[in-house]
Image (spheres, rainbow, N blue to C red):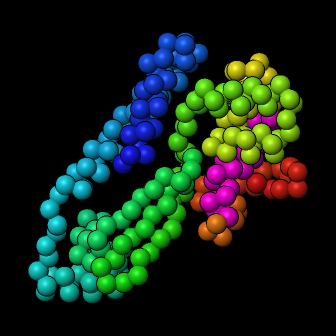
Amino acid sequence: MNGLETRRRAILDDLENPKMRKKMSERTIEEKYQKVGEIEGEVARLNAVLNRPTKYIPLPDLISLIEQLRANWDSLPPAKIRDVALVFCNGILLTPRSNHIWSFEVQWELWQNDSGIIWLNVGDKYHWFDEDVATLKDLADRDAQLEEVLQALPKFSQTAISNMSLRECGRRIVPKGSHRLDAYMTREDMSIIEQYGIGIDQIAALRGAIKAREFNGNEY
C-alpha cells in the first residue's frame, strides 16, 4: 500500500513541477494522469479488501467447495475460490521489488507459507530524482561503459536510461536496444529473477516475447 502511494506521489510531483511538465508531451501527461488514476483505483480496491469482514462459510458448503476445487478448480468462479482461500489464509503480503516484479507471500493458517514473484509485462515508470539525473550526467561526462551505467542506475532499464540521456544530455550514452527483452529489464529485475532461479527465457515466455536477433551473444 505504501509503495503504491509513493509511486502516486512521485508521478504527481512530476506533473506539478513546471520545469518537468514543460518537457513532457501531451501524450506523456495524459498517460501519467491515467497511471495516477489506476493507482488510486488499486488503493481503493485494497482498502475495501482489508476493511471487509471475514467471510463465513457453513461447514457443509465448505466441504462441498473443497471437493469441487479438488475435482476441477477452474470450474469455480474466482470469487468462490477466494472465499475458500480466505477461510484458511491469514493474509497475502505483496511487496514491490523492482520495475517489473512484485513478491508475494501467502500466509496459511494450517500450512507453511507459500511465496514467489509476480511478473508485470508493463513495468512501473520509476521517478527520476535530481540525484539520479546528476548520476546520469556524470556517467555521460565520463563516457562510462554500458555495464557501469546499468549498475549505477539499477532502478532503470537500458531503454529508459537511453531515452533520458537523450533528453538530459543531448545524446544516448547507451544504445536503446529496442529489439532486446533485457534492455527493458532493470538490474534490479535481473537480480531478483536470479535469486528465484528464473531464467530470462522464462520471462520471455511470460511476456510473449520472441527471440530477437543475436546481440552480444544473447538471443533475447
Residue at horizontal 25%, vertical 49%?
47
Q: Inspect this view and state whether residue 12 appears.
A: yes
The image shows residue 200 at horizontal and vertical percentages of: 70, 60
Q: Quadrant of the C terminus?
A: bottom right
Q: Is residue 82 left or right of residue 176?
A: left
Q: Would you place residue 181 above or below residue 62 in this image?
A: above
Which residue is the extreme one toward the left? 58
Q: Inspect this view and state whether residue 68 appears.
A: no
Residue at horizontal 52%, vertical 16%?
21
Counting every numbered tag in the picture gives 0
Residue at horizontal 39%, vertical 70%?
106
The image shows residue 123 at horizontal and vertical percentages of: 55, 45
Q: Is residue 28 left or right of residue 112?
A: right
Q: Nearer the viewer, residue 135 or 220?
A: 135
Q: Would you place residue 90 above or below residue 182 in this image?
A: below
Q: Which residues are magenta?
A: 174-194
Quarter location, residue 111: bottom left
- Assess whether residue 184 is covered by the magenta stretch: yes
Quarter location, residue 68: bottom left
Residue at horizontal 67%, vertical 35%?
160
The image shows residue 179 at horizontal and vertical percentages of: 75, 43
Q: Is residue 60 left or right of residue 102?
A: left
- Assess whether residue 193 is covered by the magenta stretch: yes
The image shows residue 45 at horizontal and vertical percentages of: 28, 48
Q: Would you place residue 176 above or below residue 114 in this image?
A: above
